[in-house]
Amino acid sequence: MVKHDLEYSYIRAGRLQRYSDWAIPSAVFFGVLALYIKTMAASIFWGSSAALAVGNSVADLPGIPSSPLYELAARLFRLIPNIDPVMRANLMSAFFSALAVMFFFVIVRRLAEAPILQTKHQKTMLANRAVDLGQWSQNEETLIIEGETRYKPVVVIFPSLAATGLFAISLPVWLSAVRANILALQLFLILLSVLLIFRGVTEKKKFRFCLGVCIYAFSFANQPLFSISFAPAFLYLILVNHSDIGTRNSVLMAGGLAVVVALFGYFSFQGQSILIPTASEYFLRLKKIVLFMASQIGWPLMAIVLFGLWGIFGISRKLFLFFPLAIMGGLAYLLWILDFNPRDYDLVGHLASLTGLILIISSAGFLYLLRLKITAGQASLLMTVLIGIFIYLAAGNNYGRADLSQVTGPEILSREIAKEIPAGGLLLVADDNFFYPMLYSSLEIKRSSQISVIGVKKLSNPTYRQWLKRVYSAITYPRVFLNDSLGHTDELVMLLCNLNAAGHPIYLQGEVPGIDASEIEPSGILFRYVGKKHSVRINKDSQQSYLALAAQLLQGNSRELQTIDFVSRWLFETGLYYEKINNPEAAWQLFNRALAIDVENIEMRYLLAVGLAHAGRFKEALQFVSTALEIVPADQKILKLGRHIIKEQEKLGVTTADN
């Protein structure tokens, strides 16, 4: 069989075929957009999503993880009237994700419609009958089977739609669509550039090819590290195909210049240098990624990727190598960044492009191989049923995790905090899940407009300090705030509290750098700064307010992982405070509740085991080690701790059997 490059023509398509070229992609876009809007977060969300939402509302706030391209798109969405700023940010993600899904469908469908080509004098079986391939064309190296290609095989629309549906409801795509984040825009840019370059190559359209290259180049202004992971794949397409469609070297130079400009704009906008993270335990990270991907698209579709690559090679030699290069680049990037965690929605979102590539290969490539043996209708039915099974298996579970429409935790948290702090009060927070929702509330909602919200971790940034002085002019600031040096967070927090303790009530989310546990006391769901000269008063049942708020935050959100993670971690850290002030009864009540909320959290069990081991309570420490190993049997850190505890026991003459 001689391979081809999608350089084929069709007899004029029928009415259904012509309408489907624009009607079906439009229906995909609006249908997916409706799903994403229905499950979209109704208000501000946790983590980096909250930071972006605040950045879309609060001008000139430094430290927001944004980008010039994202900011430009956000400005356009700000023109939508009568919508909350947070909703605009969430809606932007839903819009670009729906467009990305539509482009995914067009790519899959175009590859799936490739004709079946055979060499001269070969015969093949179609519908149990031999078909003579006829005479050799003087201008073509391959022949098209008559029965397969008089019209584009309309039936391949169904497996293409099925693959698109599975892609749309996969958690990497879905979770990026229902909250503010830059990954939705990045996925849109990558898939649009792929589609344009593919069409430019196969149709020899110079403008589409160059436009695709430029869109990819400017994606560096949104998420450069993500774009760099695709660089080998796109560079291959450009170098192999630019001469065939008549582009000049000036196009490559212009594309390279666009990348440089985009990178310069991105890092100038961020105000930071390139961060190169370290990497370790690659095989464990790869295992986590593969297991998560299999949970989203199924092991069978993962297993036929190699066969699918063979099929893609049959469809087009010029496009084939793009897919393995893109997959390898994406995997290298994912193994390079921080350890993959399915609870981190940003890390999950980085898998969206990899999910799309695997589904394109598995569906379009394997469908091509099936059509070599059976008719297009039979092959399409088989692929549609196969993919449909995994849609059925994934839909219910993913809907429960991706439906953020009922998540009100950040809004409840900011509302309850606003009730605790009197007018003119200061709130010092170290956790972004406290900081951004409360900052948005204090600057956008009148009920808390008299509260000054200060992010402790950001105080070392001189630009942020200047922003604080401009926004909260009633606060007394130390002289070091005028310096352009980074400064030490501990010193700045201590000076800020000392200068304002007399004139402003100061509240903290918990322990923050520079403030000792003996300088704060529980006050409702917060802690009040009392200083070193005052004794700390502890209400006997003070921990009950934290447990009550935790129940309120979890109500209706018991399956939402980031809410679970925040609530359990917050209770655990509050328990550490009570442990430090020698109130173990309250501490363990909070510890146990945190573990009950987040039953799979091994980090909390590790910390408790370490603390118990230091206290000589080896039996209890080993119980937490054992429980952690039941959750993650191969965790090296937990195993190392367990061995250390056993050695300490042996030094004291306590055997493992005694435990």
Image (cartoon, grey):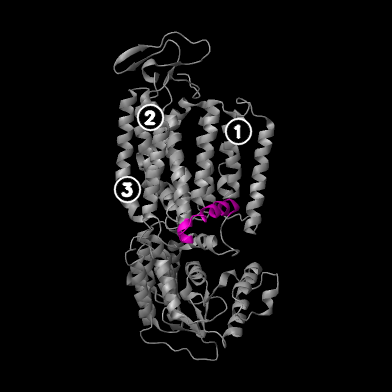
Q: CA distance from mark 2 to mark 1?
A: 27 Å
Report if the CB atoms under discs 3 and 1 are less than 8 Å apart.
Answer: no
Relative to 164, residue 463 above or below: below
Q: How many marks?
A: 3
Q: Which residues are magenta?
A: 67-89
Give x and y (percent) for residue 347: 48, 54
Q: CA distance from mark 3 to mark 1?
A: 38 Å
The disc label shown at residue 102, or none: none
Q: Reply yes or no: does residue 519 show up in magenta.
A: no
Relative to 184, residue 481 above or below: below
Q: CA distance from mark 3 to mark 2?
A: 23 Å
Label 2's element? helix
Give x and y (percent) for residue 560: 37, 60
The disc label shown at residue 238, or none: 1
Which marked residue is nearer to the observer: mark 3 or mark 2?
Answer: 3
Q: Residue at x 39, y 67 (%)?
A: 409
Give x and y (percent) for residue 549: 37, 74
For this orientation, the residue located farthest to the top is 135
Q: Is residue 506 visible?
A: yes
> Disc 3 or 1, which lies upstream in sequence?
1
Look at label 3 and name its amino acid: Ala
Nearer to the camera, 491 or 203: 203
Look at label 2 and name its amino acid: Leu
Classed neighbour count for the residue bearing mark 2: other residues with Cα under 10 Å, few (<14), some (14–19), many (≥20): many
The disc label shown at residue 367, or none: 2
Quarter occupied by the N terminus: top left
Relative to 349, residue 502 above or below: below
> Disc 2 or 1, which lies upstream in sequence?
1
Which residue in the protein does label 3 denote? 395
Majority secondary structure of magenta residues: helix
